[in-house]
Structures are given as structure tokens and as C-alpha cells.
Image (tube, rainbow, N blue to C red):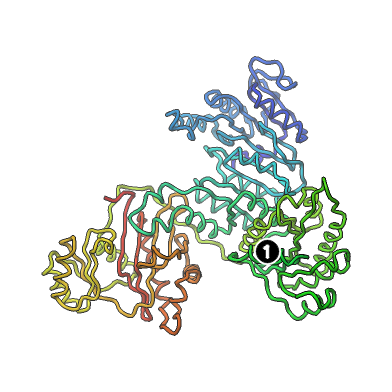
Amino acid sequence: MRGLDRLLRPHSIAVVGGGGWCANVIEQCRKIGFSGEIWPVHPRRDTVAGLTAYADIDSLPNAPDAAFVGVNRDATIEVVGQLSARGAGGAVCFASGFREAQQETGDGHAKQEALLAAAGDMTILGPNCYGMLNYLDGAALWPDQHGGVPVERGVALITQSSNIAINLTMQNRGLPLAYVVTAGNQAQTGLSEIAAALLRDPRVTALGLHIEGIDDLRGFEAMAEAARTLGKPIVALKIGRSDQARAATVSHTASLAGSDAGADALLARLGIGRVRSLSGLLETLKLLHVTGPLSSPRIASMSCSGGEASLIADTAHGSGLVFPPLGERQRQALRTVLGPKVALANPLDYHTYIWNDEDGLGRTFAAMMDADLALGVVVLDFPRADRCSAADWTRVIRAVARAGKISGRPMAILASLAELMPEEVAQQIIELGIVPFSGLSEAVEAMDVAAELGRARPAPMPLLLPRPGEAGTTLSEAEAKSSLAAHGVRIPAAERATGAEAAATAAARIGFPVVLKGEGIAHKTEAGAVALNLRSAGAVAEAARAMPSEQFLVEQMVTGTVAELLIGVLRDPAHGYVLTLASGGTLTELVEDSVSLLVPSPPEAVREALGRLKLFRLLCGYRGAPAADIEAIVSAVMAVQSYVQAAHPHEIEINPLLCGPHGAVAADALIRIGDSHD
């Protein structure tokens, strides 16, 4: 581990450069209350921002713990080398024009290599990055304004976008920020290493990531394992789709298992929650800061409006959240408080009969909270402070706090619109140990993610890392099936033949009925290169003559199929080997029904993934139909993974895998080795 801890928690800071950005760093250090030494460095100025300036790095009183380097890229390389030689703890490299600008400058890679060589063992953040804010210890290597305040404990945020980092500091949702760190283009110190250092700080309660790309899968795995060991949850906003996934168009797998599916599979595998928006990221972190991951998706909702009760139920529809029906104990306790006119349900509309009765409110909220509920949510929208009074709302807050103490269950107060949860109220609510949600949709997303994070799961298996691409070839269907069969995939009896007469002869040897396929054609059905259920040699010869091919594969016709499944694997350099299970055959294009895992995945994970398919009802025997052999399907998936681990292909697709009561047979298969296909 390099001196990242020293850089993140410095006692002395050097600011190199004389422009407005460097003056801003000094101003932000003063504003945040930095108590250590600040040493401006400029070769021609006596002072910078009112502080005595030093002519060069060698003139500094001591080796600084941290430095902000705010000069052009060529000077940055020189200064970083001087800081490294002096024994500095680390540096923020503000300049751009390195790897991220390769297309514009043409020498970005060379400049970045020179920067890394100059840094040696010294830690650097960036280049092309704003730096970091430490709100716990009062340290700001940051060249711009920001909206945070000192805290004693809170969440850490890491982003690869400096502008997004600024915006996140401006949140007014009451979320306490412990650190905000930007990674820039991660020339040396990547997101995973930064995250691991922040997680080690006992004052950090949870970690939020804004990810544009993952460049070190092993480091990311190690970071997630460290979080698991420390019991600190991670939530991520992952954006972007890989060019590699978009470029692979020979099969259905490529469109089903693009980078986004790979990201989903990676984050789920490592126990990292995924959100879809910045507001969802902040609300989820707020929940995790106050309560940690939820013990289950079982939620109780309470509001004084039927409209709000319906709205939260509708908003949560399609999520994993559950509003369990009320039990007899809950009903009796609620009836005692609310009387006969209130319809008792979850979500509960408790009406306004008890609005001014703090004791009644507390008893109502406590009555709703069974021991098996993960969270109690009271919908409460606060009025505008500039035009209205919120005095009556205080008793509701106290009643929620009381209910939490009585029931021993976590509680939240939810404002249906973000602007209806004032920041000062949110901060007060957090002090009471209550989650202050800002926005209904964001709250539902936060609860859903937190419940998934709280789900017990075994430690994940190490990922199979993608190998570098090579000049590629696509195997024939017969070659692909033979390769998979060697690892345990069941395939039909088959022969290859040249010409219509040879195909008819091969069919007679196999036994009718047979399937005839023209070889060398990627999408055979669309090209008219597949004929099914051929029952005579003459029918085979006639079908062969009608196909746009002279090379044929003649196969045993598999009968008794319950459902058709797709098994695909795509090499995604950003996330590993993405394993996709989906409805197969013609349904692949008609039905959005797929799940993705990463290789290797154990049998229990494969079974669980199969259970999430819409197709699973067919596999289990729909409306009296026979059920498929689920274990045979799982075995086929495990066999495909075995081949991937041995051969490291670019892409595999079995479509369809014919699933029946007595087994699962690969009716068609494609394997692509390397990155290109002709």
C-alpha cells in the first residue's frame, strides 16, 4: 500500500502553482478548518493567497503529506518527480492532457507513462482530477467551491467525474459526507484502492461509487471483500456500455449480455447495491448510514392520506419490496387507537383523527411494527418554511422516534417530494436515528437496494478474468458442439455431409426423423437453412437442394421438448465472462426474458437464476404439462462454464437448449474464438 492514507489525512499540504485554482485550494483549506501547515510553491512569487511562497519543492520546510499540483501537464511531470524525491506522501494531479486526451494530443499515453515514472512509489490521484475533500479531519485538496460541512462520521463518495463530485457536495438532503474523492483517469491509483483506504476509516459508515469504468477486476473484488469483512455496505451508480459488447453482433447473446448486464452481474455477485440515479445514490446512502442494510424487504407504511397510501404502494409495484398484510395483534392494537372508521391495511391510511394526538400517533406507529418488519415508513411532507408553520409536524417526528424505541425496529420519515424534506429537518431526524427520505421514488429505490444488500449470501468465487483478444475464428456448428460435448454438454447424434445425396444417406444412418442444417450460415432460420422433422431420405434430399449451402449437418430430431432455453457466454473485458440464461428459440427476440451471471457461478446460483426467468413456469410444468429436468439444465450450464474456463473463448451460444423431462440437449451451438469473425 502506497501512502494513500497520508494523502487522504494530511498534516501538511503543499500547493504548487500560482493561478486562481491554487489560490482556491488554499481558500478551501481555510474554509474547511484545516489545522496543519499550508506551503504554496511558486518560482517567481513571494506570496500566494496571503501565504509565504517557496521557490521550489526542495525549499519546503519538510516533505509534505499531500500536494496539489496545479500546473500544466509537462510541469506536472517535473513537479511530481521532485515531490517523490523529497518523500512527499502523495499528490493530486489537476492537469489534463494525458491518457484521456490521447486522440486530441497524440502523445497522451507517453505523457502518462512519464508521469508514472516520475511518481515512483509516491501516490498520485488523477491526472485530470479535482482531488479530495476530507470532512472528518478538515482537509481540502480541492480547487473549487463545495457544499459540505465538517462531520464526525458519515459516508464516503468516490467518482471519476470531478463535476459530479462538486454537484454531490451540494446535496441538501441531510446526508453526512465524510469524504469526497475524485479518481480522474486513474493513471496509478484506481477507484478500488481509494475505496479500500476509505473503508478502513472507522468513521466511514458506507461507501458510494459513481463508476464510469472498472479497470482492475481483481482490485474491485478485493475492495468488495474488504467491505464485507468490515461490515460496511457499498452502493454504486454504474454508467456506460462497452464498445466490446456492442461490436459482437453474430449472436443473440451479444445483445442480451452487453456491458450493462455485465455490470449488473458483477455488482450483484460482489454484494454491491446498484442504483439508477444520483438522487437514488444519495437516498440509499442515507438509509445505509442510519440503519445499515435492511434485514428483509418487508416494509410497513403509514400516512394520514389514502392518496399517499395508494401512491407508495403503486410506486413500489415491480420492486422487491413487500407490504405484508396486518396480523391479528396489529389489527387489535390499531383498532384500539383508531376506532371503527379506519380501514386497517398496510399501507395504512390512519386518517387525521389523531393528527394532534402525539400519544395516539406513537401508539399507532408502534402497533404497525411487527418484529419481522425491516423498516417502518411514515409519509410526512413538510410545509414551506417561508410561508407556513411546521410546528404541528414536530409531534409526528417525536411519535415516530417513540415507535422506534417501543418496537425496536428501524423507522423512516418519507417526504413524497424532495423539496418537502428541509435539510435542517433531515439533519434533526438523523440525530434521532430516523431515516429522512427525500422523494418517494428515490426512497423506494433505496429500500429495495438496502434489502438486497441485507440478503445473506456466500462469499463469491473469484472471477475468471478475460484474456487479451486474439485474431478470431468462428467454429462450425459441428465443431462447436463437439467442443462442448467434451465438457459434458449433451448433443444429438449427427453427421456432416457434402451434397444432398450424402445428406440423405447420413440421415438414414442416424434414423428418422432428423433435422437438416446448412453449414457456414450464422442465422440459419432467417436464411432458410434449417429443416425440421424430416422423415425420409427423399425429404432430406429435397430440403438440402433448397438450401443456400452444399455443406450440411444432419442431426437426430429431439422430441418431448418442454421449453427452449438460451445459454450464452460473452467475454466482457470490463466485467469478466458474462453468462446469460434466456428464453431460447424464436422467443429470444420476442420476449425480454434473460438473467446474467459471471463465470464461474456455482450450481445453486444457476438454479436461482433460472428461477428468475419468466420461462421457469414452463420448465416446472405449466398447466399440467410435464416438467423439464432442471438438474439436467443446470448440468448443461456448468458444462458450458467448464469449457469457458478451459478455452477462454470470445463468445458461446447454445440456442436452443431443448429442455425436456429426460434431459437437456444442445440443438444449435456457436463458438467464437478471439475478437473478430469473418
Task: Please tell me whether residue 540 is drawn above or below residue 98 in the rendered image.
Answer: below
Q: Amino acid at mark 1?
A: Ile
Residue 381 in percent (x, y) is at: 76, 56
Question: Is residue 60 toward the left or the right of residue 259 in the image?
Answer: right
Quadrant position of residue 618: bottom left
Residue in view at x 63 percent, y 20 percent: 56
Q: Nearer the viewer, residue 339 or 446?
A: 339
Nearer the observer, 563 or 313? 313
Residue 592 is situated, as x and y percent measured from the top left of the image, at 45, 63
**Residue drawn where x is 18% and y is 60% of the image:** 548
Q: Nearer the viewer, residue 336 or 211?
A: 336
| Residue 640, horizontal then vertical, whole percent | 37, 65
Q: Residue furthest left?
A: 501
Structural crowding at the residue carrying mark 1, measured as other residues with C-alpha within 10 Å and reported as few (<14), some (14–19) or many (≥20): many
Kindly indicate the quadrant of the structure image that contains residue 670: bottom left
* 516 versus 258 height, above or below: below
Say whether residue 645 is visible: no
Name the residue beneath numbered marker 1: 312
Residue plotted at (29% across, 60% down) = 523
Q: Kindly state the secondary structure of the residue where label 1 is placed.
A: helix
Is 50 located above or below residue 67 in the figure? above
In which quadrant of the rendered view does residue 296 lie? bottom right
Query: Does 136 appear above or below 489?
Result: above
